[in-house]
Every structure is written in C-alpha cells, then in structure tokens.
C-alpha cells in the first residue's frame, strides 16, 4: 500500500484543489478585513481559525498596518510624467550612398510622441527647412542634385523645437549621360 500523498489526491481530483484554493483565498481575504482572529484545536488535533469567537478559541493578536491617507490623492492629482522627447532618422543611414537617377530620397523617422495636438516634424536638407511641417514619419524628396547632403529632423510642439535628430550625411549618385560633341 502506498503512503498517502497530497499530490496524488489533487491529481485524481483537481476540483478538490480548486475548492481548497478558493477556501484559502476566502480565508485570507476575510482575515485581512477582520478585526479579531480566533484559533482553536479540535479533538483530532486540527487547528482552526475564525473571525467569530468560540468557547475553546483563543484570540490572536495581529499586527496593525497603516496606510498613508494621502497616498491615493497625491497619485491622482499628479499627471504621469512623459519620457524625454526624441526623434530619430531610421533611413537613410548615416554616410549611406543612394543610387537614384530621379534624385529621390525617401526618409523614414521614429519618435516617442504622437504627432497630434501640436506635435509635428520638420525636415532640414543641407541646413534648409524643406516643405512644411507634417504629422507623418515619412518624406519623399524628389529631384535632389547629386552629391553630398545632410539631413536632420526637428520635433515641434506648438511650433517650438523640443527635440532634434542627429544630423546625417548621405551621398546621392545619379547617372549622367554625356552628349556627344559635334565635330
């Protein structure tokens, strides 16, 4: 005969484990709100706990816990702090060579601000502002001359610069067909 193992009992009847778990959680939650806890041992040697006094029960003194009264009001009145704003160029990469005969540069960006409620992005090409501000994270610049160019993004809040990306350099190559000279 096998010795009694609680694991075997719960494996054969998982419903029993559920009942035991619910009972324990109910006991713990009721004990947390009860002002007095009583304990007694029955004739079979089983220790019992209750929030109701009995003839054989002894009162257990529980430590009191104190919760600051201003804890809930201070967290509700303070708005959550936002992380420091940032904007970053994802593509093209710094010192990337672009081979584009139409002179097209496609720019992708990322920011930690939603581009609503006055947040906008502004693109600078070679130090000059390009187009107008926008709320999109992608630009397409067309007919850009071949050569070296610098790109930078600015994150605006109500038209004030609150963050800017690192300036990157890209090299645009465009094929050029040379015309034959007349002799």
Image: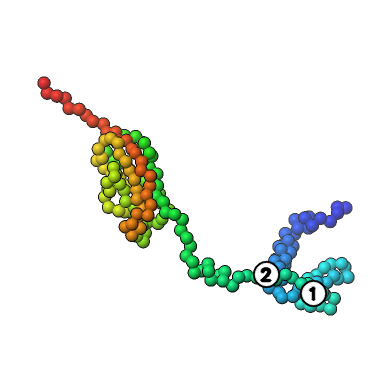
**Does residue 109 appear anywhere in the picture?**
no
Decide which of 73, 93 is in the foreground and name it.
Answer: 73
Question: Which residue does the numbered mark 2 point to in the structure image?
Answer: 65
Look at 38% across and 42% down and name the residue there.
Answer: 91
Decide which of 26, 90 is in the foreground and name it.
Answer: 90
Q: Is residue 59 left or right of residue 175?
A: right
Decide which of 9, 180 is in the foreground and name it.
Answer: 180
Question: Which mark, residue 59?
Answer: 1
Give the quarter of the image for residue 60.
bottom right
Q: How is the image coloured?
A: rainbow
Q: Position of residue 183 (x, y in %)?
A: 11, 21
Look at 86% across and 54% down and name the residue there.
Answer: 3
Label 2 residue SS: loop
Q: CA distance from mark 1 to mark 2?
A: 18 Å
10 Å crowding of disc 2: few (<14), some (14-19), many (20+): few
10 Å crowding of disc 1: few (<14), some (14-19), many (20+): some
Give the mark, 1 or 2, whose residue is nearer the N terminus. Answer: 1
Q: Is residue 32 left or right of residue 147?
A: right
Q: Position of residue 128 (x, y in %)?
A: 27, 46
Q: Position of residue 95 (x, y in %)?
A: 36, 36
Q: Tell me if residue 27 comes above or below residue 171 in the rendering.
A: below
Mark 1 or mark 2, whichever is nearer to me: 2
Give the quarter of the image for residue 167.
top left
Give the quarter of the image for residue 43.
bottom right
Q: Is residue 1 left or right of residue 112?
A: right
**Does residue 153 appear anywhere in the picture?**
yes
Q: Tell me if residue 106 comes above or below residue 31 in the rendering.
A: above
Look at 77% across and 55% down and name the residue there.
Answer: 7
Decide which of 20, 114 is in the foreground and name it.
Answer: 114
Question: Which mark, residue 17?
Answer: none
């Amino acid at each position: 005969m096998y010795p009694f193992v609680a694991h075997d009992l719960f494996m054969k009847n998982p419903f029993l484990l559920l009942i035991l778990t619910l009972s324990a959680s109910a006991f713990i939650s009721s004990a947390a709100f009860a002002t007095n806890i009583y304990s007694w041992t029955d004739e079979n040697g089983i220790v019992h706990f209750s929030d109701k006094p009995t003839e054989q029960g002894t009162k257990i003194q529980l430590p009191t816990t104190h919760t600051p009264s201003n804890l809930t009001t201070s967290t509700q009145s303070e708005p959550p702090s936002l992380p420091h704003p940032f904007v970053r160029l994802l593509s093209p990469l710094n010192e990337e060579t672009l081979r584009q005969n139409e002179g097209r540069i496609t720019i992708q960006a990322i920011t930690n601000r939603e581009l609503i409620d006055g947040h906008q992005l502004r693109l600078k090409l070679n130090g000059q502002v390009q187009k107008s501000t926008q709320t999109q994270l992608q630009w397409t610049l067309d007919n850009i001359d071949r050569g070296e160019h610098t790109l930078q993004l600015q994150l605006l809040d109500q038209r004030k610069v609150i963050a800017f990306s690192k300036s990157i350099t890209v090299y645009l190559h465009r094929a050029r067909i040379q015309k034959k000279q007349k002799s």
